[in-house]
Image (cartoon, rainbow, N blue to C red):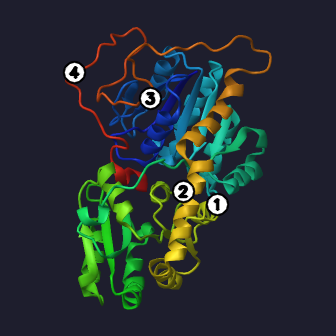
């Protein structure tokens, strides 16, 4: 089938962009075509950057989408992506697609157990006008069904996890050889809880002589610059400050992969959030996780067995110390995560479950015929190679762009920390 995505897209830094990239890669290019209509900042084969944040976009997106004649459109929804007033313009796009009888799936990446009146107004229209809804956790489906009914429309498909091997010799390459690495990484925001390190690390350091705290964070523009500065100043004054290492940079995917491969424990003390791409990145490398008790984290770690959940901040130090000093526990956490990825949560499995959602929309009962698609020899499908130029409409010249640049898998790593 031909699948159209509406999303942000790499190399733009955004967790939704990274998610769409991985899903698109996982869809079998020998069986399915795909294209992406995105905000400015996206690039690649079959990628059409059509609007800037804050601009009106639904009419242009609809026009391009219908020219591409998709079998199904898949919108990746986050409130901040689709303009003002909680992204209300996505409602206009959905209505246009429904009037044109284009089956449309919407993945709601953020659904809280308790929603606001403004969110309720937008979500009501999304649930009504979409052909199907995807959420990542069972409690999110419960919320939508409680508020709007339509349980047959809502499908639970967990956040996919990359199927990758650890970076060889990562500790040595990062100058961490012989150390027990406690890693905190992501964008600096108050909701991420980086300051919890001030409380838990001195206790961990007392119990584990070779433990080091690695802070690998960045800021977006000048956002949270003061948060970062205050944290670093406080860390410099705390006990065992000489055992804190700081890494800075843009953290392209392979660099983040190396950091996660070197980690003996990753701490995610988030104070708010409905999902986390960073948690999926940790599980991909079997890095044992110690997280806050957020519902989304708790459900993922209970399902995967890849980490420990702390209901109170006072529990972080003891949980981290257990992971560092009990090899059997750490090995069990890693093994459980690998088994979950192989059996259930790897992107190849997640792509299959998306196809199960698409298929009845594309081929309803009573439809006839077998879908025919044979990739052109030497063609690129499914975004396996990025050319760095905008997508091309059907019939456009398909000669390769010899001067184009390419992006590595995953593009910018900390996009997944959104």
Q: Image quarter for residue 126?
A: top right
Count of marks overlaid on the render: 4
Q: Is residue 130 visible?
A: no
The residue pinned by badge 1 equals: 303
The residue pinned by badge 3 equals: 37
- At x 40% / y 22%, what residue is drawn? 380
Q: Nearer the viewer, mark 1 or mark 3?
A: 1
Q: Earlier in the sequence, mark 1 or mark 3?
A: 3
Q: Earlier in the sequence, mark 1 or mark 4?
A: 1
Q: Earlier in the sequence, mark 2 or mark 1?
A: 1
Where is residue 75 drawn, in percent x and y?
Answer: 54, 35
Q: Earlier in the sequence, mark 3 or mark 2?
A: 3
CA gap, disc 1 and disc 3: 33 Å
Question: In this image, 62 relative to 142: left or right?
Answer: left
Question: As drawn, which residue projects farthest toward the left?
Answer: 403
Q: Image quarter for residue 214?
A: bottom left
CA gap, disc 3 and disc 2: 33 Å
- At x 26% / y 84%, what residue is drawn? 241
Element under disc 3: strand
CA gap, disc 4 and disc 2: 39 Å
CA gap, disc 2 and disc 1: 12 Å
Element under disc 2: helix
How many C-alpha atoms fall within 10 Å of the one at disc 3: few (<14), some, or many (≥20)? many
Q: Nearer the viewer, mark 3 or mark 2?
A: 2
Q: Nearer the viewer, mark 4 or mark 2?
A: 2
The residue pinned by badge 2 equals: 338
Q: Earlier in the sequence, mark 4 or mark 2?
A: 2
CA gap, disc 4 and disc 3: 24 Å
């Amino acid at each position: 089938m031909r699948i159209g995505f509406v999303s942000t897209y790499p190399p733009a830094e955004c967790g939704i962009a990274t998610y769409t990239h991985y899903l698109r890669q996982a869809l079998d290019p020998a069986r399915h075509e795909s294209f992406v209509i995105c905000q400015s900042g996206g690039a690649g084969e079959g990628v059409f950057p059509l609007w800037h944040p804050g601009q009106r976009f639904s009419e242009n997106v609809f026009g391009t989408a219908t020219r591409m004649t998709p079998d199904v459109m898949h919108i990746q929804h986050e409130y901040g992506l689709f303009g003002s007033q909680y992204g209300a313009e996505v409602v206009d796009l959905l209505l246009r697609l429904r009037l044109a009888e284009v089956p449309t799936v919407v993945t709601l990446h953020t659904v809280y157990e308790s929603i606001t009146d403004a969110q309720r107004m937008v979500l009501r229209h999304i649930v009504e006008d979409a052909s199907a809804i995807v959420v990542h956790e069972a409690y999110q489906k419960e919320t939508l069904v409680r508020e709007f009914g339509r349980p047959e429309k809502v499908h639970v498909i967990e956040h996919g996890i990359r199927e990758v091997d650890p970076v060889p010799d990562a500790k040595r390459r990062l100058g961490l050889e012989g150390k027990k690495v406690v890693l905190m990484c992501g964008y600096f925001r108050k909701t991420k809880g980086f300051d919890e390190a001030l409380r838990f690390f001195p206790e961990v350091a007392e119990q584990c002589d070779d433990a080091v705290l690695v802070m690998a964070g960045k800021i977006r523009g000048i956002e949270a610059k003061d948060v970062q500065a205050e944290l670093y100043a406080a860390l410099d004054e705390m006990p065992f400050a000489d055992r804190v290492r700081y890494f800075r940079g843009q953290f392209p995917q392979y660099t983040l992969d190396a950091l996660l491969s070197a980690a003996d424990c990753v701490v995610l003390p988030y104070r708010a959030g409905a999902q986390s791409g960073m948690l999926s990145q940790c599980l991909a490398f079997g890095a044992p996780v110690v997280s806050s008790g957020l519902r989304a984290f708790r459900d993922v770690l209970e399902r995967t067995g890849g980490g420990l959940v702390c209901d109170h901040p006072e529990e972080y130090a003891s949980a981290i110390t257990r992971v560092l000093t009990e090899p059997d526990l750490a090995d069990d956490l890693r093994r459980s995560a690998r088994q979950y990825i192989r059996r259930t949560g790897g992107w190849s499995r997640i792509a299959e479950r998306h196809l199960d959602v698409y298929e009845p929309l594309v081929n309803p009962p009573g439809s006839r015929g077998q879908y025919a698609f044979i990739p052109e020899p030497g063609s690129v499908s499914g975004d396996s190679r990025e050319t760095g130029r905008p997508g091309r409409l059907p019939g456009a010249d398909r000669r390769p762009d010899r001067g184009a640049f390419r992006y590595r898998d995953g593009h910018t790593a900390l996009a997944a920390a959104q």
